[in-house]
Image (cartoon, rainbow, N blue to C red):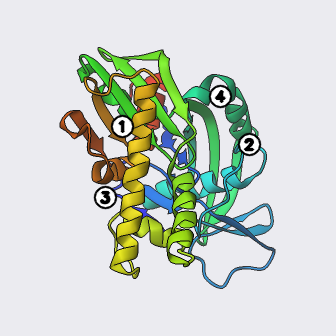
Amino acid sequence: MRIQKGGIEMVKIGDGRYVIGFDDGYQLGKTANYIFDNGVHMLGSVEPTLKENSLFYEGEYFKVGEGRAAITEDKVSSDAAMLRTMAAIAMELGSAGIRRAEVVLAVGLPFSDYGRGKLGLADYYARHGSLAFSYEGDDYEVGIAKVVVCPQCYSAIAARLGNMKGDYLVVDIGSKTTDVVYVHDGLPIESRSITIEKAMVKWMKEIQREMKVQTGKDIPEDEVMKVALKEGSNLPGAHAELIRGMLRERMRSLELELAERGYSMDYLNIIYVGGGALIARDYAGRYRSHAAYDCDLCANAKGYEFLARQLVGKGAA
């Protein structure tokens, strides 16, 4: 699966380098302009029949963007993240007709992992400073001139912090974790910001198990997700309603945990960002009167580019 989000607008700084943000999620990869499945499959030395989603690197062919990869403890212990990143870079550059470029790569980590993980992630990408690869039949030569590592969730709202007066709770329900950033008068308060081990992939697995118990049926994860996102599903109406009820339970559980962790949910302005905002919008209810939903799945990737541009130079072309 690959989705293009509107027109392609790339960030180019004054020295000719391009800024490319890549949000390497545990379910989807997102750039500022593209969304794709995060699965990586090694094919070996034999050229694939179809060029779609195919990447050729160091003598091996891969399919990047077909299905979901298994959740791992980190992204730096294998080459899979690098292969996804090459595909992401090719999508962005290729859409602009660019095959050779120096790029500033902007990537992210969960908010609570940022301090201890940023050097390792930057080093992981810096080791691949010069890349020569083919994607969907086109050859690319890419130099990674600089790596900027950004905190997730914060990045999604970084460009609007100046307008956030008062107290806000920014919630990013991701695939593996939920990041929560507390903002006071436009300033993130790190001591009140957390990462919770509750997120979409875990919820999907739990719902699949509960559906098996209640219906005796093995419901595929993608069918559960179709119901969650109100997309077309072939599931019986009664099964879909059960899934919707389970999603409401999980949103209530997340809201309760936030309240138990000391957040005054009755009074705070709440902003849900990213893909999880779609679930929050449709299945949360108690705090709707003071909650907002930024449902742009590319919000973090765009935020990474915004922060990287601030860091490396103001001269955007």
Dot 1 or dot 3, earlier in sequence = 3
The alpha-carbon separation of the residues under discs 2 and 3 comes to: 31 Å
Dot 2 or dot 3, earlier in sequence = 3
Q: Which residue is mark 2?
A: 76
Q: Residue at x 71, y 42 (%)?
A: 74
Please say if 222 is above or below 184.
below
Q: In front of the other: label 1 or label 3?
A: 3
Dot 2 or dot 4, earlier in sequence = 2
Dot 3 or dot 4, earlier in sequence = 3
Q: Which residue is mark 1?
A: 317
The image quarter containing residue 137 is bottom right
Residue 313 in view (yes/no): no
Q: Residue furthest bottom?
A: 49
Q: Nearer the viewer, residue 160 or 72?
A: 72
Relative image position of residue 240 (x, y in whole percent)? 37, 71
Quick one: SS at disc 2? Answer: loop
